[in-house]
Structure formats: structure tokens, C-alpha cells
């Protein structure tokens, strides 16, 4: 019998925790599973709420505190706590799993032999009205995933899986010493949102090490969206920070430099800015997506300029 751990990291979402734990304890799975909450310095009633939930009947709930701020230390703490388990299933504290979520994850990792598995993430607008300007092309920046109704094996990162709905075979992670990259850490309220980059980096490392990655449409969760993420400014900041991280950690050194960054980045920024202005003045519906490209291009320059001498 496999040992299964279902984990989530949490920060200041005490009011959501009873519903999440109830939904997890209602999961039906042939394999027994434990629950793990990693509290990342919450300032609300999270500890008291979790203590009460741990005393209730159902799948055992264990609570640990991770003092280092940010989603990456919290998730790496979950990996550490899962060292004695066969399988680790991740979701976020602002999500609710559909029936069969845990069973589908365990089936993919055990019967199908996957090293990693994940499924759809549906953005839930039942609590907050979806803005009219928020098109389907932007939902991916709220961590939405829908790769269709058929299971398949991932061969590249074109159809990604995120840690807000993912499961790992722990033996594979241990064999390849895989952890989340601290350079892409996110702190505070944004920690449970998309855009830090640690998901992408982990996916790339899994692919590079030959992991068998399975998409399971029956491994489904609903993601509640907070009002702060339903503003245009959120999407602009998200892309800007992503550009900064890429400029700081991923861009190759430039042969020709200007003001501390590769010279070729400046014409790219100017072109993106010009396109944004043209779309904005013509009231084109795609101006926001184009503006995100502009903030990303600016982030590339700012990130690169933050590199220390000798940075590879």
C-alpha cells in the first residue's frame, strides 16, 4: 500500500481552510492519505483554525510552520515533510478539489507509472464578478489550465502543469535532487498566485531529467480569485516581475551593452511600447495583453541591470 500525502501551503486564508479540509476529507481513494498544512507566517487565525481542524474526524491533518517567507520555502518544506511518503499531491489554499481528485493523482502515479501528474484548474468567479475586459486569453495568468478531456503524456512545456494542481512520485524527486528554485520565490499575498516562475523552472527540470509527466482531466480543482487579481494593474505587475526574474537569472550575457543591459533589449522595449500606444489610442481590445508585453520587456532590462559582477 502506497503512502500518500496531500499538502497545501497557506498564508492568511483562515476563512478558506475549513472548506478546503472538508473537501479533501470527502475525497474517496483506495489508498489512505494524510493531509499537511504548511503555515508560512500567517498573521490571522490560521494556526487556531488548523488546530481545530486537526482534531476533527477524517484524514489526519498535520500542521507545520515554515518561518522563511515565500512560496518556494513553503513548498520545499512540504517536500521535506513528504520524504517518507511515496506520493505527494499539491494544491493551493485558495482552491477546492473536485470529487476524484486524489484518486486520479494516485492512479496516474501508481498504475500509469507517472513521475509527475496534474490536471485542470478552473477559475471560479462565483464569489467575485468577472470583469468584462478579462478575456479567456488572460485566464492562464490566473493559473487556469484546461488541456482538454483526454489524458496524455507531456513532452514539452507548451501545455504546462502548475503546482496549484500537481502530484509527484517522491522517489523520482529524491533521485534527481529536485527542489523548487529559491531565485523565483514570491512573498506575501502574491505567494499563492501565478507568475513567480518556480513552476516553470520545476517543469523544465522534470522534462530535462526525463520525467514521465501525465495530464489527467479528472484531476480537477476550482481556483477562487481574489478581487486584487481582477484588476489590470495586477496583470501588468505580474508580467513585469516575470521579466525581471528572466533578465536577472536567464538571459545570456550581452556582447554589446547600454546602460547596464544588452543593447538589443532597448529597441525591443520601444517596439512593444509603440504597439501598446497604437492599440490604446484606437481602443483595441488587445491593448492590455500588448501592455503586458511592454512591462515584461521593461522588466528584462531592470532585471539584467540588477545582476552582480560575474553573474552567470
Image: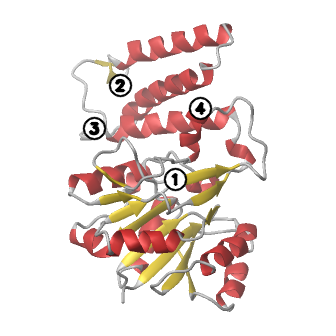
Q: Nearer the viewer, mark 4 or mark 2?
A: 4
Q: Residues within 10 Å of mark 4 (few under 14, many from 20)?
A: some
Q: Left or right: 57 with respect to 64?
A: right
- Between the residue at mark 3 and the residue at mark 2, the CA separation in whole angstroms equals 11 Å
Q: Report the front residue among 251 and 153.
A: 153
**Considering only order in the chain, which callout, 3 or 1, is on the residue closer to the N terminus?**
1
Image quadrant in which you'd find residue 2: bottom left
**Considering only order in the chain, which callout, 1 or 4, is on the residue closer to the N terminus?**
1
* Dot 4 and dot 2 residues touching (CB under 8 Å): no
Q: Which mark is residue 260?
A: 2
Q: Nearer the viewer, mark 1 or mark 2?
A: 1
Q: Residues within 10 Å of mark 3 (few under 14, many from 20)?
A: few
> Element under label 2?
loop
> Element under label 1?
loop
> Element under label 4?
helix
The total number of labels drawn is 4
- Residue ID for mark 1: 186
Residue plotted at (52% across, 14% down): 273
Amino acid at each position: 500500500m502506497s503512502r500518500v500525502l496531500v499538502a497545501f501551503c497557506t498564508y492568511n486564508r483562515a476563512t478558506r481552510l475549513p472548506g478546503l479540509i472538508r473537501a479533501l476529507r470527502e475525497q474517496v481513494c483506495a489508498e489512505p492519505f494524510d493531509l499537511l498544512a504548511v503555515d508560512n507566517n500567517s498573521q490571522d487565525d490560521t494556526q487556531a483554525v488548523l488546530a481545530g481542524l486537526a482534531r476533527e474526524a477524517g484524514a489526519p491533518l498535520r500542521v507545520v510552520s515554515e518561518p522563511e517567507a515565500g512560496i518556494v520555502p513553503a513548498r520545499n518544506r512540504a517536500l521535506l515533510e513528504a520524504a517518507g511518503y511515496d506520493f505527494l499531491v499539491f494544491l493551493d489554499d485558495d482552491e477546492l478539489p473536485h470529487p476524484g481528485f486524489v484518486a486520479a493523482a494516485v492512479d496516474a502515479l501508481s498504475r500509469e507509472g507517472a513521475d509527475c501528474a496534474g490536471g485542470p484548474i478552473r477559475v471560479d468567479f462565483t464569489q467575485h464578478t468577472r470583469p468584462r475586459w478579462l478575456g479567456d486569453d488572460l485566464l492562464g495568468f490566473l493559473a487556469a489550465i484546461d488541456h482538454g478531456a483526454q489524458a496524455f503524456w507531456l513532452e514539452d512545456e507548451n501545455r504546462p502543469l502548475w503546482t496549484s494542481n500537481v502530484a509527484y512520485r517522491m522517489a523520482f524527486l529524491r533521485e534527481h535532487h529536485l527542489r523548487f528554485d529559491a531565485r523565483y520565490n514570491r512573498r506575501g499575498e502574491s505567494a499563492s498566485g501565478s507568475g513567480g516562475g518556480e513552476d516553470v523552472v520545476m517543469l523544465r527540470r522534470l522534462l530535462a531529467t526525463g520525467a514521465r509527466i501525465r495530464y489527467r482531466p479528472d484531476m480537477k480543482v476550482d481556483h477562487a480569485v481574489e478581487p486584487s487579481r481582477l484588476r489590470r494593474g495586477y496583470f501588468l505587475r505580474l508580467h513585469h516581475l516575470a521579466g525581471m526574474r528572466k533578465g536577472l537569472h536567464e538571459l545570456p550575457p550581452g556582447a554589446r551593452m547600454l546602460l547596464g543591459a544588452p543593447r538589443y533589449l532597448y529597441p525591443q522595449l520601444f517596439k512593444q511600447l509603440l504597439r501598446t500606444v497604437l492599440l490604446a489610442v484606437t481602443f483595441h481590445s488587445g491593448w492590455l495583453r500588448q501592455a503586458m508585453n511592454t512591462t515584461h520587456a521593461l522588466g528584462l532590462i531592470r532585471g539584467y541591470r540588477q545582476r552582480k559582477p560575474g553573474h552567470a
